[in-house]
Image (tube, grey):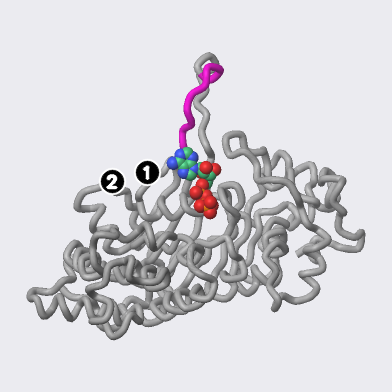
Amino acid sequence: MTLSESPAKAPADEVVLEAVGLTKHFPVRRRLADIFTGRRAVVHAVDDVSFTLRRGRVTALVGESGSGKSTVARLLAQLYPRTGGDLRLHGQTTHVRGGRRFRQYVSRVQLIFQDPFGSLNPVHTVRYHLTRALKIHGNAGNSAQELEAALANLLTRVALTPPERYVDKFPHELSGGQRQRVAIARALGADPEALLADEPVSMLDVSIRLGILNLLRDLKERLNLAILYITHDIASARYFADETMVMYAGRMVEGGDSETVTQTPAHPYTRLLIDSAPDPDRIAGIADAGAEDRGNGEPPSLIRPPAGCRFHPRCPHAMPRCTVDLPPRLEVGQPGHWAACWLYDADTVAREGIGAVGDPSIPTPPAHQAPEEAR
Ligand SMILES: Nc1ncnc2c1ncn2[C@@H]1O[C@H](COP(=O)(O)OP(=O)(O)OP(=O)(O)O)[C@@H](O)[C@H]1O
């Protein structure tokens, strides 16, 4: 078998991968007190995360450091066993740990790492890395000519042309951007349906980031790929992703189409994120409201995460209910736009009042600002 020359025949928008209540807790070393109490402490890295990856679409997963984004990518790549929840490939539950079934899974779902310097072996050439990927996934053809054609095809797909200029280079002879292109070409050697790109540009020079994002977008369109784009840069999600989901302290707090989430953010945490990463194109009203509503402090301990909404200790709008009840996903206007926030439950707001337990050092929204406007 060789690489498909034309975009996959699967319909655009077809669901490839589905996370349903995905949960990952990492055990932490036992302390003396734990032995007496019989408790085993865990890091709640990812709790109850649900979303779908579709053909021909980029889904961004955004959040600050430690929010659980990389753990989600590793769960989707099945590098970690999950603590709970389900992972479905084309609707079928999938649970693989090594061996042939893992290789079959990996040929459909490929992970691209953040660090193009660490992910390529410095003693091997581009030819070696790509040939290995093609052979492992049965895409190297049946002759030396077919292999050569497949190598040229991969390099051309990632715009490393002419291919003969790059194929025999070692990683140290390439720039960071060129190395990341080789890493992407290696992932494409599997002829996958889904790419999981974990901060694919964060270690690259700012001047070449756009080129890599444009390449991924081009691949999404030409190869009809489903792409998960993990980033802490919400402005790039607006530019690059079709949908954006926001994670805070291991939980999803907001989701919807990227334009809506970035231009009319609903969750106070999303507003904080946008506020700390100014986007010049953002509409003035949101920018002003964000500056006023800014929460402060640090993300919580994931060993003993706060009850209720995990953002409530930092939230200027927190109400008593936020400290005890976990908010469900609530619709916030545009179809498909949701926020896990009690601000969007009219009964709770009417009963408790916005900001009743918020940090008093942070100004609460003006009295006229109804939950509708708090979006
Ligand atoms: N193998 C592990 N063992 C214990 N805790 C872990 C492990 N991997 C991650 N964690 C913890 O899980 C939480 C989520 O980490 P994760 O790396 O997924 O976050 P992230 O959003 O990707 O952050 P970053 O952008 O810094 O990579 C963190 O508190 C982290 O310390």
Q: Which residue is mark 2?
A: 97
Q: Which quadrant holds residue 323?
A: top right
Confirm if mark 2 falls within 8 A of ligand 1. Answer: no
Q: Which quadrant holds residue 278?
A: bottom right
- Residue 360, horizontal then vertical, whole percent: 87, 45
Q: Which residues are magenta?
A: 25-34
In this view of the protein, which residue sits in the foreground, 103 or 119? 119
Mark 1 residue element: loop
Pointer 1 or 2: first along the chain: 1
Mark 2 residue element: loop
Using the rendered image of the protein, determine whether residue 229 is visible from the camera's viewpoint. yes
Residue at coordinates 42% horizontally, 72% vertically from top-left?
177
Compute the Cα span from label 1 to label 2. 8 Å
In this view of the protein, which residue sits in the foreground, 307 or 151? 151
Most extreme residue toward the top is 36
In this view of the protein, which residue sits in the foreground, 172 or 280? 172
The quadrant in which the C terminus is found is: bottom right
Identified by mark 1, the residue type is: Pro
Q: Return the mark for residue 81.
A: 1
Q: Answer few, some or many: residues within 10 Å of disc 2's Cα (few below 14, many 20 plus, some between 14 and 19).
A: few
Using residue 98 as the reference point, say whether residue 336 is left or right of it.
right
Relative vertical location of residue 102 with respect to residue 178 in this rendering, above or below = above
Identified by mark 2, the residue type is: Arg
- Residue 141, horizontal then vertical, whole percent: 13, 74
